[in-house]
Amino acid sequence: MSFQVDVVVMAAGKGTRMKSLRPKVLHRLGGRALAQHVIDCAARLSARSVVVITGHGAEQVEAGLSAPEAAPGAAATALKYVRQEPQLGTGHAVQQAAPALPDDGVTLVLSGDVPLTQPDTLQALLDLCAGERLALLTLDMPNPTGYGRIVRAADGAVQAIVEQKDASEAQRAITEIYSGIMAVPTRLLKGWLARLDNQNAQGEYYLTDVVKFAVGDGLGVQAHRIDDAVQVAGVNSPLQLAELERAYQLRVAEALMVQGTRLADPARLDVRGTLVCGQDVEIDVNAVFEGRVVLGDGVRIGANCVIANAVIEAGAVIHPFTHIDGEKLGVSVGPGALVGPFARLRPGAKLGAEVHIGNFVEVKNSTLAAGAKANHLAYLGDATVGERVNYGAGSITANYDGANKHRTVIEADVHVGSNCVLVAPVTIGAGGTVGAGSTITKSTAPGSLAVARGKQIGLEDWPRPVKKR
Ligand code: UD1
Ligand code: CA
C-alpha cells in the first residue's frame, strides 16, 4: 500500500475566546507556534505537501510559520498557503484547498489549533484509509458537548457525523465524537466537496457531511477510535493553552527521563525548543530551556536557571538562578566549568575548561581560556581572557566608547584586582598584575604591575580631625 499524503491544515478561524490580538494558531506551545507543531508532524509522516488554509490574520499566520525540516533521507515537504475569505465553514475551507491537492493522493485534514496529535496515531489513520476509504479519528468523551457526534448503525458501521446544533436529543447522548481529523482519498473528497450545502443549523458548509455522502455512495467509513484526549484537544482559551503546555512538557520530561536524565520534578521543567542531554545529567526544579540547548555528560543544572541556545560541556555545573542566553551567537561552557549562582552569560560567551564564573558576573562576547576565574560582581564584554586569569570583584571592561566597541585582551596568568576599569582597546601582558582600583587606558607589558588610580585619600589627608563618638 503506497500513496502520497497531502495535509490540509485548517487555520482560518478566529479564535475569539483567546481574547488576543495574535491569530490563535500562532500562540506558542513548547516554544513553537501551535500550527507549527501540526506542520512539523506532517513532515514526520513524510507528507508530500502541507496546505495551510488561512483567513483571520492570514498575513501574520503566513509570516509566522515555516516549512518543516525534512526527516533524514526523506524528501522535503512543500508548504503552501490558501486563503479562505470569508469563512463559511470547514467544508468551505477545504473547498478552497482542493485545487492545490493532486488527485492521486490522500488528503489528511488537520487543525492548526490541535498541536499534540502523535505521528503514530495519524499513521494508523492513514493505514485505515489505505488510499481507498474515508477514515475518521474519533474519541470517547464523557462530556461531548459542542462536538460532532459519530452516529453508528446497529452493526456498528459509521453512518454520519451530526453537529451538536443539528443533533437530536438521542444523538446528543452519543459520547463518541469526531476529532476534526480525517484521512480521505483526494479524488473522492473532491467529488463530495462539490455536493456540500449549507442547509443546517449554523448555515455553514460542513466538511463532516462527506461522511453521509460516502455512506450514500456505498463506501464504508472507518473510524480510528483513541482514548488519549490530549492528542485531539484544541486550543480555544488561555486555560486550554496552559493545560496543553503542561501536557506537552510532561511528554518532554518523560522522554528525557526514559533516556536517563534525572529531573528533580518532571512537573517543573519547561523546554521551549530542543534539549539534548548526555548521560548522567541532573536538572533541579524550575529550569527553563529555550532554543537549542545541549547538556554534556554529568552536567548539573541548579534550580531556577533559564538557559537558551547554549552548549554546556561534560561535568559543568550551573548553579541556581543563572541566566544564559546565547541568542544567535551562542554560548559555550567548557568541561568542568562552574557558573553561578546568579551569573549571566550573554551571546558569544565562550568559557573554557574549569572556568569559574561566580555570582553577579556578566560575560558577553568574550572568550575565557581554561582555568580563568571571575568569581564576584564583574563585567567582561568583548574580552579575550587567557588561561588561569583571576579577575577581581567589581572590575569591568569599558568596551564601549559611545560609538564603537573595542576588545580587551587579558593574557594568561594575569591577576586583575578589585574595582578595576580596563578601558578598551587595551592589552594586559601575560603574568602581570593590575592593582585594585586602577583605571587602565594603555596596554601593559608582560609581568608588570600596573597601578593607575585617582587621588588616594588616607586618614592623614582628611581635612578635619575625626571625632571620637
Ligand atoms: C468541527 C467539526 C466537529 C468536530 C470539531 C472538533 C465541522 C462542521 N465540525 O467543529 O464535528 O467535533 O471540529 O474540534 O467540521 N475553520 C476554518 N474555516 C472555517 C471554519 C473553521 O479554517 O470556515 C477551521 C478553524 O480555524 C479550526 C477548524 O477549522 O481550526 C475547526 O473549526 P471549529 O469552528 O473549531 O470547529 P467546529 O465547527 O467547532
Ligand atoms: Ca464552527
Image (cartoon, grey):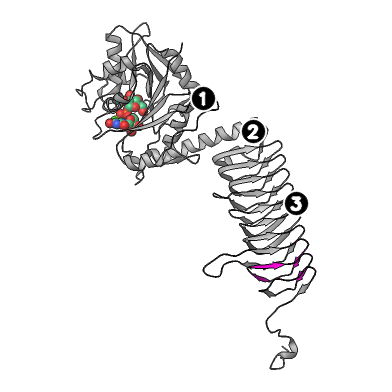
Q: Mark 1 is on which residue type?
A: Ala
Query: Which numbered disc flags the more N-terminal residue, 2 or 3?
Result: 2
Query: Residue 257 shows which numbered tag?
Result: 2
Q: Position of residue 291 (x, y in %)?
A: 54, 43
Task: Give me the residue at 60% from left, 51% from top.
Answer: 324
Q: Secondary structure at mark 2?
A: helix
Bounds of the magenta span?
411-434
In-image side of 31 versus 461 (left or right): left
Using the image as rendered, state which of residue 456 and residue 69 is in the foreground: 69
Callout 2 amino acid:
Met
**38 is higher (above) or lower (below) than 384:** above
- Closest to the observer: 413 or 265? 413
Q: Nearer the viewer, mark 2 or mark 3?
A: 3
Q: Is 421 contained in the magenta span? A: yes
Marks 3/1 in contact by CB < 8 Å: the verdict is no
Quarter that holds the C terminus:
bottom right
Q: Is residue 252 left or right of residue 47?
A: right
Q: Hey, what amino acid is under mark 3?
A: Glu
**Position of residue 39 measured from the top left corner of the image (x, y, whole percent):** 44, 31
The residue to which callout 1 is attached is 74
Q: Position of residue 336 (x, y in %)?
A: 74, 48
